Amino acid sequence: MPFSNEFMDNPHADRVRHVARLSKAKARQRSGLFLVEGPQSVRELVTYEPQLVKDLYIQAHADYQDAQDEGEAASEVVTRILEHPHIRDMYVHYVSPEVMMQMSQDAQGIVAVADLGRMKSNSSDLAAMVQKRQENEPIRLAAFWEIRDPGNAGTVIRAADAAGCDAVIFVGNCVDASNPKVVRSTVGSLFHIPLIRMATDTFFTTMKDAAINVTAADVHGVEGQQSESLPELVNSESLGKDSMAVLFGNEARGLSDDILRRCQKIVYIPMYGKAESLNLATSAAIMLHTLAMSSHVGRI
Amino acid sequence: MPFSNEFMDNPHADRVRHVARLSKAKARQRSGLFLVEGPQSVRELVTYEPQLVKDLYIQAHADYQDAQDEGEAASEVVTRILEHPHIRDMYVHYVSPEVMMQMSQDAQGIVAVADLGRMKSNSSDLAAMVQKRQENEPIRLAAFWEIRDPGNAGTVIRAADAAGCDAVIFVGNCVDASNPKVVRSTVGSLFHIPLIRMATDTFFTTMKDAAINVTAADVHGVEGQQSESLPELVNSESLGKDSMAVLFGNEARGLSDDILRRCQKIVYIPMYGKAESLNLATSAAIMLHTLAMSSHVGRI
């Protein structure tokens, strides 16, 4: 791996400031770069999307400077990442704890700077995915309309990954997925599953053209279309055969009636106790995983 | 409702300091009181556990002092709480925004001080619950071993409530459930469902005596006992007839082998994508809700 010769120990260096600034949306837009923090996220980045990595910054052992050796990471889990074959082609920089702290307070010994432009999936990727798919292998998408909370956004990407969805779609005015809090909350799932952004109208026309039914997650339904319960949906004949996108609403406002009218089905999670509702991330995990389990096992 | 005559506008008053201090464990132990913050939590407290309420503090309209009227809450949702018939017997105090801010930064216009001693459920409550139960109405418990994160603890109590569990059991050295962050994260579910604390040994002997099977949530299983997948468990004959406690492990360490050996079954949530795992709160929600849906609908 092409190590940088220079051990970075000046927390005020330009390069350190440039990395730290990637926590701001403006700096990410201007530079086309984003931050990946912590061993788990960086490991998944290095494993699944190595071509995105511009630079890796590793916190060195406290005695690194004295030892003058090639460099040793401060923690074992980071050392294991450095043994990955993909690392060979990456720029690895050893930095002091002060420099690391300046770059990111959530690094736990390792951060990567990654290329935003090369990661962006778009609707043509989805079209390609639809074309490649076999007839008896339906597509499963998790779509989120105007999701705004970074922690929620990361958690639902992870849930969609765990449920084996083919892609996540952020519909309309959603949170910026390169926000470090989103990246951290996905715990690497951001590099497992394509994330596609679409305007609301584009989403519905794309789904229609690809013959993917849109099922809205909503308790109340809308005039002319009742919401059915998740167990009913799971018991329905077509499930498992048809391609399907499950569309979840905004954390506070849910889905508008206008959006609900454009969906083929509306489904809700039955509540059995006295709780009125579950939050978005929990609802998405229950719904996506229930659908995944039921189509993998026939009936669960 | 017995209003306090005095409008509280001195943020340095003794009473204000006493309320604010309830964010600290020591102050809660000494006083036997705890804080319930925000309209949703207070509404559920007033509705389901009114006997716990010692005092209600409502943030008054900015013009309250000038108007000299009986008192008007600063928000509509708080006003609706004040219309609840249970409010009649409660001590309601109107306070200035400064006083409210001093008492709690998560009040959103309303906090209650509640009686900790009267809330504590214990194992004799569970025994009573077991005795009252009919034969064809099995008991469902959600048990958490050494759960430590307050946000997680609150979220899993809410998930257990939503899944219609009969009680939540905190096993071993768990977080203090009167911690304000736990209370807030339950969004009122703390007042819907009994929460019982038990030492690890007591838990297993209590379950055995009550003929409640313990199913551990664990991916790996233990020598001599493999983990079966959640869909397999849901398809098994006995599910829905037998009483059952699902036991979840600590956020970082899971369940020890020693604990796993004492459980009747071990079950895991299958992962379909590239994600390695889900966090505790998400796993608990998926597992508890899947079991609930399957026993309510026969097979889902």
Image (cartoon, coloured by chain):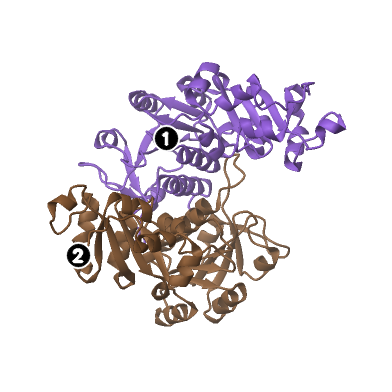
Chain colours: A brown, B purple
The answer to whether residue A247 is above or below residue A117 is: above
Q: Secondary structure at mark 2?
A: loop
Towards the viewer: B89 or B130: B89
The answer to whether residue A294 is above or below residue B185 is: below
Q: Secondary structure at mark 1?
A: strand
**Residue A293 in view of the camera:** no
The structure residue drawn at horizontal position 26% and vertical position 35%, both measured from the top left corner, is: B261
- Figure quadrant of the C terminus of chain A: bottom left
From the viewer's perspective, tell me whether residue A147 is left or right of residue A157.
right
Q: Chain of mark 1?
A: B
Percent position of residue B52, x then y = 63, 23
**Which one is closest to the eye, mark 1 or mark 2?**
2
Percent position of residue A90, x then y = 24, 69
Crowd around label 2: few <14 · some 14–19 · many ≥20 (10 Å): few
- Figure quadrant of the N terminus of chain A: bottom left
Residue A117 lies in quadrant: bottom left
**Residue B231 in view of the camera:** yes
Towards the viewer: A68 or B13: A68
The residue that disc 2 covers is A5
Q: Amino acid at mark 2?
A: Asn
The residue lying furthest to the top in this view is B30
Percent position of residue B118, x then y = 57, 19
Number of marks in the image? 2
The structure residue drawn at horizontal position 35% and vertical position 60%, both measured from the top left corner, is: A16
Percent position of residue A254, x then y = 63, 58
Q: Amino acid at mark 1?
A: Ala
The tag on residue B143 is 1
Q: Are marks 1 and 2 in contact (CB under 8 Å)?
A: no
From the viewer's perspective, tell me whether residue B100 is left or right of residue A245.
right
The answer to whether residue B157 is above or below residue A6 is: above
